[in-house]
C-alpha cells in the first residue's frame, strides 16, 4: 500500500492554512483536513488554541452568535465555560503571593469556642489592634529617645534656665579673665600621688548607732532637729590650724576637702560654683566665699526632669539646696548614740568656744606630695566612729533626700526595701555630682565606711518634717569604683589647676564654673573682693526665699553659725 503525500499550501499572510472560500470550493473538499477551517493568526497576536474539534459545525447557537461567518464561531471561546475555567487555572498557577507570612492563629478559648461561626474575624481584628498599639508604642518610645538626646545635648533645654544659666557669683566689669579651661581637657589628665601623712587630729567623735542599719520604710524614724548644736563651715584662710601649718612651712598649697572635692568632680557638675584662690608669696590658698554655693548641697543637679523656676517654690533648686543642707546636718547627729561617750583627739575643735555644744566632727589635717618641693595640706572631716572587732573605724555620714516621687519616678517607700539598687541607680543619675563629692571627701579623710541615709518628706508639700527610711554603708574605694570615679584623674585635675595658679602673680583670683558651658574660667579680682566691705548687688526681693517665721531663724542659724563663731573668736598663728 502506497501512502501519498498531498501538497501543503503556503500561506504568506498568516500562520495557519490559507483561507478557502466556500463558494469556490466543492463541499467534498471543505471537510478535507488540509482545508479545515481555522482561525486567522496575525503575527502580532498571541498564540492560543487553534481549533475546538469538540464543537458541532452545524450548531445553530453558534451560527446565531456569529451569523456573518459560521466557521469562525468554532474559535469563539468567550461563552465556553470550560475555556474560562482553563484560563482561571492558568492564572492561578502563575499567581504568587508576595507576603509569605502565615495567617494569624485565632486565640481559642471560652470566648471563641461557642461563637466562632458568628465572629470568625474578631481574633484577626484583635491582633491588628495589638499590632497597631505596638506601633504607637514604638513611635512614642522613639519620640522620648529623641527628646532625651536633645536634652542631653542642650539643643532644646530651656526648662532649667533659671538654675543653669545663672552664675554663682556676679562677674564684675573690672575683673580680668585670664584663662578658660574646658572640661574635655580634664578627662585626659592623670596623676598618681603617694600615700598621704597625717599631721594633726582635732575635735571629738561620738559612736554610731547601729540600730539605724536595720531601718526600713515600715519602721521609719522621724528626723529630729538639733538646734543647740553648732555646725562650722570655715574656709581655708580662717582656719587657725592651717595658718599655723602655713607659718611652719609644712606645705605650699592649702585647701579643705569640700573645695578639693569640687575641683576633683568638676566634670560632673552642672550648676555654677566658684572658688577663691589667693597667691601669697610662694604659697597658694584655695578659699570659698561666705555664703558660697559650696556650703549647700545640690539636689537633682544632673537630672533631666524640670524643676520649678520660681525661687520661692519649695521644689526650686535653691530651696532644695537649703533643705538638703538642713537634712544632712541633722541626720549626721541623729544616728549617733549620744550617751556622752566620745573619742577625743590631739586637740579640741579649733572653731568651738569652751563649753559650747558642737556637732560630732573630727578634723583630720593630711599632707600629700604633689612634687619634689610642693606639698598640699587639706582639712578633712569625719562625723562618727564605730567599734568593729575591737578596732575603731571612722565614718562619714551623709543623707539623700526625696522631695517628690513625681520628679524622680521612684517611690522610696515602695521600692527601698525590695529594690534598693534601683533607688541608688536613680540617685546616681539625678545627683551624680553630689554623690561623687561625698565619695571623694571620704577618700580624702581615709574613712573606713561611708554611710548614706535615705530621708524623705512626711508629705511632698511639707519641706520641714522628714523621716529616715533607711541607712546603707559602703566602703569608699569600692563605691568609687562602682560609680567610675578615677582617683588618678581627680588628682590630675588638682595638679593642673595648682600648676596653672603657681605661674600667676601674687594676688587674688576666682575660679568660676561657667553657668551654661562645661568649662571653668579664671578671673583676676581686686584684693578687697569678697571682703566684709565689698558690697555685691543683693538679690531682688521677689527672688529671695521666704521661709516660715518659726523655722527660718533655726535653719539659717544652723547652716551659717560657723562663720559667726569664727569671726568672734580671736585667732593667733603660732610660728
Image (spheres, helix red, strand yellow):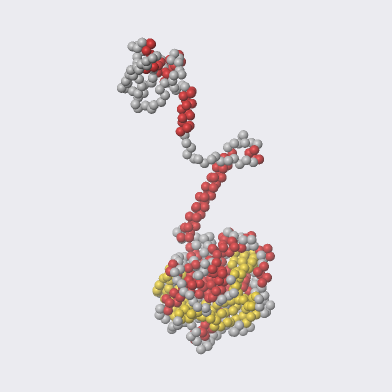
Residue 178 in the image, given as x and y percentages of width and height: 40, 74
Q: Is residue 1 visible?
A: yes
Q: How many marks?
A: 0
In the image, residue 247 above or below residue 100: below
Residue 520 in the image, given as x and y percentages of width and height: 44, 70
Residue 14 in the image, given as x and y percentages of width and height: 33, 23
Q: Nearest the camera: 489 or 332? A: 489
Q: Residue 346 sits in which quadrant?
A: bottom right
Q: Nearest the camera: 331 or 490? A: 490
Q: Nearest the camera: 536 or 376? A: 376
At 61% from the left and 66% from the top, the residue drawn is 454
At 51% from the left and 84% from the top, the residue drawn is 245
Q: Residue 38 sits in which quadrant?
A: top left
Q: Nearest the camera: 430 or 104? A: 104
Q: Residue 382 sits in which quadrant?
A: bottom right
Image quarter hosting the N terminus:
top left
At 36% from the left and 10% from the top, the residue drawn is 26
Residue 458 in the image, given as x and y percentages of width and height: 64, 64
> Which residue is outermost to the left?
12
Q: Is residue 359 visible?
A: no
Side of 39 relative to 124 (left or right): left
At 57% from the left and 40% from the top, the residue drawn is 124
> Which residue is outermost to the bottom?
575
In the image, residue 305 above or below residue 1: below
Amino acid at each position: 500500500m502506497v501512502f501519498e503525500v498531498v501538497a501543503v499550501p503556503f500561506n504568506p499572510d498568516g500562520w495557519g492554512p490559507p483561507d478557502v472560500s466556500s463558494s469556490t470550493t466543492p463541499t467534498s473538499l471543505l471537510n478535507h483536513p488540509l482545508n479545515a477551517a481555522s482561525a486567522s493568526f496575525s503575527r502580532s497576536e498571541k498564540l492560543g488554541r487553534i481549533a475546538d474539534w469538540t464543537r458541532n459545525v452545524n450548531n445553530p447557537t453558534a451560527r446565531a452568535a456569529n451569523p456573518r461567518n459560521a466557521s469562525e464561531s468554532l474559535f469563539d471561546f468567550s461563552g465556553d465555560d470550560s475555556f474560562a475555567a482553563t484560563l482561571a487555572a492558568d492564572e492561578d498557577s502563575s499567581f504568587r503571593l508576595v507576603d509569605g507570612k502565615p495567617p494569624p492563629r485565632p486565640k481559642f478559648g471560652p470566648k471563641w469556642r461557642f461563637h466562632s461561626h458568628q465572629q470568625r474575624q474578631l481574633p484577626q481584628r484583635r491582633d491588628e489592634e495589638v499590632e497597631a498599639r505596638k506601633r504607637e508604642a514604638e513611635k512614642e518610645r522613639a519620640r522620648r529617645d529623641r527628646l532625651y538626646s536633645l536634652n542631653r545635648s542642650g539643643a532644646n533645654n530651656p526648662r532649667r534656665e533659671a538654675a543653669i544659666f545663672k552664675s554663682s557669683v556676679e562677674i564684675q566689669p573690672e575683673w580680668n579673665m585670664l584663662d578658660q579651661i574646658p572640661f574635655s581637657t580634664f578627662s585626659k589628665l592623670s596623676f598618681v600621688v603617694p600615700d598621704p601623712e597625717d599631721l594633726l587630729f582635732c575635735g571629738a567623735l561620738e559612736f554610731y548607732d547601729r540600730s539605724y542599719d536595720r531601718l526600713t520604710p515600715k519602721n521609719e524614724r522621724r528626723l529630729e532637729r538639733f538646734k543647740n548644736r553648732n555646725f562650722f563651715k570655715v574656709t581655708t584662710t580662717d582656719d587657725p590650724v592651717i595658718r599655723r601649718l602655713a607659718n611652719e612651712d609644712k606645705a605650699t598649697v592649702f585647701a579643705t576637702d569640700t573645695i578639693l572635692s569640687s575641683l576633683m568632680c568638676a566634670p560632673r557638675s552642672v550648676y555654677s560654683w566658684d572658688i577663691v584662690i589667693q597667691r601669697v608669696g610662694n604659697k597658694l590658698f584655695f578659699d570659698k566665699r561666705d555664703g558660697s554655693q559650696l556650703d549647700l548641697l545640690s539636689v537633682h543637679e544632673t537630672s533631666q526632669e524640670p524643676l520649678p523656676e520660681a525661687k520661692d517654690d519649695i521644689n526650686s533648686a535653691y530651696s532644695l539646696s537649703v533643705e538638703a543642707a538642713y537634712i544632712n546636718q541633722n541626720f549626721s547627729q541623729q544616728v549617733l548614740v549620744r550617751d556622752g561617750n566620745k573619742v577625743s583627739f590631739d586637740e579640741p575643735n579649733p572653731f568651738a568656744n569652751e563649753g559650747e555644744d558642737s556637732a560630732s566632727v573630727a578634723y583630720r589635717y593630711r599632707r600629700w606630695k604633689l612634687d619634689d618641693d610642693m606639698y598640699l595640706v587639706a582639712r578633712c572631716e569625719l562625723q562618727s566612729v564605730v567599734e568593729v572587732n575591737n578596732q575603731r573605724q571612722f565614718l562619714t555620714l551623709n543623707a539623700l533626700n526625696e522631695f517628690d516621687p513625681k520628679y524622680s519616678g521612684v517611690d522610696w517607700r515602695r521600692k527601698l526595701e525590695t529594690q534598693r539598687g534601683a533607688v541608688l541607680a536613680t540617685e546616681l543619675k539625678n545627683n551624680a555630682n553630689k554623690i561623687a563629692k561625698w565619695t571623694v571627701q571620704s577618700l580624702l579623710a581615709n574613712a573606713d565606711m561611708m554611710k548614706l541615709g535615705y530621708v524623705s518628706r512626711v508629705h511632698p508639700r511639707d519641706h520641714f518634717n522628714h523621716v529616715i527610711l533607711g541607712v546603707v554603708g559602703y566602703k569608699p574605694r569600692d563605691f568609687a569604683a562602682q560609680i567610675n570615679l578615677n582617683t588618678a584623674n581627680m588628682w590630675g585635675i588638682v595638679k593642673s589647676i595648682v600648676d596653672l595658679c603657681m605661674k600667676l602673680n601674687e594676688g587674688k583670683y576666682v575660679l568660676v564654673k561657667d553657668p551654661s558651658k562645661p568649662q571653668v574660667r579664671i578671673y583676676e579680682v581686686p584684693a578687697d573682693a569678697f571682703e566684709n566691705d565689698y558690697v555685691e548687688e543683693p538679690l531682688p526681693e521677689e527672688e529671695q526665699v521666704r521661709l516660715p517665721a518659726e523655722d527660718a531663724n533655726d535653719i539659717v542659724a544652723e547652716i551659717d553659725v560657723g562663720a559667726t563663731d569664727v569671726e568672734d573668736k580671736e585667732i593667733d598663728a603660732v610660728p
